[in-house]
Amino acid sequence: MSTHLLYSIAFSKIIGLNDKQRKLLLAHYSSAEFIYKERFNLQIPFLDINDDIKKILLSDWPWDETESELAFIQKHDIHATCVFDADYPNRLVHCDDAPTVIYVKGKMDFNKKHLVSIVGTRQHTVQVNSVIHEITEGLAHLNIGIISGMALGIDGIAHKNALNKKIPTWGVLAHGLDQIYPKQHRRLAIEMLEQGGLITENKKGVIPLPYFFPKRNRIVAGMSDVTIVVESDIQGGSMITAKLAFDYNRNVFAIPGKIQDPKSKGCLLLIKSNNAQMYYDSIDFLETMKWALPEMNPNRIDPKNPQLTLVLEPDALSILEIVERQGPIHPDDIIRQLTIPPGAFATHLFMLEMQDFVFKQAGNLYIRL
């Protein structure tokens, strides 16, 4: 284990300093090792440093605790990286309150061309599943990673959808890496190690107390180019993440919902207060972010191709042609153009969705896949 990491972890565990102060000290002295050696300056150690901070730095450093932490991460194949290190998250390092050290279990290649955080409430509506599917489906062609907080609800759905689309995904934890919370996500956490991983600033033994959840949200926001809030109450934890992202000068998007639904109130407030842009669909999102649009699939069957008549009934083919030409389109606007009975129409539309010919977006709007 490098001496650089030894000093960095010890420095991160000093009580009495916050992350902003640690980052400023590291920028001034170049490394935690040089900060430690400054204690033995034969002239005046820590010249021009605040007396209170100087007193903290001159006190004993927590070497026993540091050695215990090092033994733990070595045993469990956990990587640790310090702010300003080359492998530290390259967006997070620009945040004033970036964690001094983060611990990563899994892949370290989170410095992707694009990183998106997807967050929201634990108690969500049924609509969330199709919304997150649409988001991840629309991003899967990019060199991208998905960040979220491993919580039940929208966080977990975001991680699972990313895995299904082969998109690397990282979960930011509010506790140490000697446990997984919630326990229901233990299997999900293991699966994420294959394509992404788990990230925390907390040492082993730190349990998921309420204080640590808002604190970890700054990592979710700070690691990402853009944060998408899917559903949230006005007081939801996702609102903290959105505010942090906005304060970090990152892009924020919110999914609009029903004005009577408390789970949409937070998103609507973000849009109303101009703290977030409205998420309409993945194409609009990509255009707003000026990211590459997906290329048309050359193997996609054209609706007018005679081959489709072998697998689709004439009424289903008529529905598909309308969605192709006019989508995103509401079912009511489709059926007005046809003479199909409502029951048969609903069945055909459902089968087209199940066979991945069409996809239902937010607002019950259908597009061609």
Image (cartoon, grey):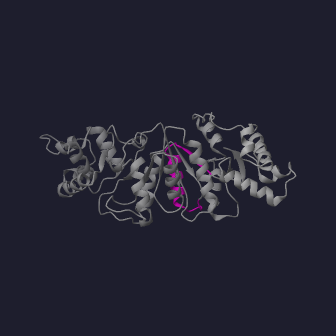
The answer to whether residue 80 is magenta is: no
Residue at image coords 30%, 53%: 17
Q: Position of residue 163 (x, y in %)?
A: 48, 50
Q: Give the extent of the magenta segment.
A: 232-254
Residue at image coords 46%, 50%: 220
The answer to whether residue 237 is magenta is: yes
Front one among 95 and 91: 91
Can you say whether 89 is above or below 216 in the image? above
Front one among 78 and 298: 298
* Quadrant location, the C terminus: top right
Q: Is residue 25 visible?
A: yes
Residue at image coords 76%, 37%: 304
Q: Position of residue 182 (x, y in %)?
A: 43, 65
Front one among 242 and 334: 334
Indicate left or right for 289 with 221 as reference: right
Choose top left, top right, bottom left or bottom right for residue 138: top right
List the single residue furthest toward the front.
310
Q: Is residue 361 visible?
A: no
* Quadrant location, the N terminus: top left
Indicate left or right for 7 with 193 as reference: left
The count of marks equals 0
Q: Position of residue 178 (x, y in %)?
A: 31, 61
Residue at image coords 33%, 59%: 176
Indicate left or right for 2 with 345 as reference: left
Q: Position of residue 190 (x, y in %)?
A: 39, 56
